[in-house]
Image (cartoon, helix red, strand yellow):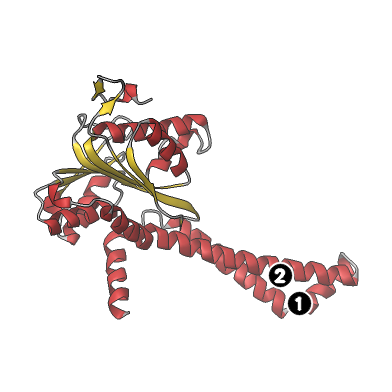
Amino acid sequence: MGKAARDWAQIYSIYGLDDWHTPIFLLIHAIFFSVLSVLFLLYFEPICYFLQHFLLGASAARFTAGFTGSVTALSAVCLFFAAGNIFYSSVSLHWEMAQRMVNAVTDWSTVKHALDLGCGRGILLNAVALQLKKSGSSGRVVGLHPTPTRSLTTLRTAGLEGVQEYVTCRAGDPRTLPFSDNYFDVVASAAFVHTVGKEFGQKTAAAAAERMRVLGEVVRVLKPGGVGVVWDLVHVPEYVKRLQELKMEDIRVSERVTAFMVSSHVVSFSKPSHHFVGSNEVRLDWRLNNLC
């Protein structure tokens, strides 16, 4: 247990939190509601007396005080859980899911080019690099993120993990990936695709179209016979439907995992070696205009 605790502490020290404001905000409110519920418990009778004489009758006052105290206590519990889940999902769960994702690829020794789409601070990126290193592959993994300033932080974590020679980072738009067709043996993405198009609103048709553009780009840059692995939130059923429309093979969806307070799944698939569109015709063009 000591070793596991030390390992998790090391992982958190390497990667930190992308968004520490949210769990802190939730934690502060959880503490506030906890204090409030304790005050309702300790001063229940005075509160009832106040409500009875200034606002309500005796029975209504006790009900109101009890109900309000229960709601504040329940709110505190929910806020503590939300803060803990976001803190856990940001690093610990992200790391665990990264291990699951790399295990979806059966043979890393043959992988020459891999892509981590939306690499963030490099948890999945470095997990892929570690697999390449362990397998003795001469391959490399590219981490792509839409924020240009992200690269330095990501490369720093790769150095701390001892895999900097396997990693490169670059900025780019995930909707128009700056790579040629059929380039990568593996394309992976962790908790990123759902963020694309969020400026249109998560539930809008425009946002869904942007996510499908990203998925189309993933398929385009993937080599025939290559493997795609995407861990994402909420929208995975949309991805599965689109992958089926694109005639991807071996589509698999993991069990549900609660991450960032919502449902998440890993979907993996392989790109067919050839795409048959007729009895004698084979189409090898996977450009975006054929996917959308």
Which element is circle 2 on?
helix
Specify the label residue 69 is tagged with. Answer: 2
225 relative to 138, above or below: above
Amino acid type of the residue that numbered disc 2 sits on in the rendered structure: Gly
Please, what secondary structure does the residue beneath circle 1 have?
helix
Left or right for 94, reference 49: left
User: Would you identify the image quadrant in which residue 179 lies?
Assistant: top left
Q: Nearer the viewer, residue 178 or 37?
A: 178
Q: Is residue 233 above or below residue 205?
A: below
- List x then y, in percent, for residue 251: 36, 43
Quadrant containing the C terminus in the rendered view? top left
Residue nearer the viewer, 232 or 61: 232
Spot occupied by residue 176 in the image (x, y as percentages of width and height): 30, 29
Q: Is residue 259 visible?
A: no
In the picture of the structure, the residue carrying the numbered disc 1 is 44
Residue 185 in sight here: yes
Residue that appears at 19% across and 60% down: 161
For the residue carrying disc 1, how many other residues have a C-alpha within 10 Å: few (<14), some (14-19), or many (20+)?
A: some
Q: Is residue 188 left or right of residue 141?
A: right
**Residue 18 x/y as whole percent:** 36, 54
Q: Tell me whether circle 1 and circle 2 mark residues in contact (CB < 8 Å).
A: yes
Mark 2 crowdedness (10 Å alpha carbons): few <14, some 14-19, many ≥20: many
Of the pair 159 and 194, the residue shown nearer to us: 194
Q: Residue 45's image quarter?
A: bottom right
- Number of callouts in the render? 2
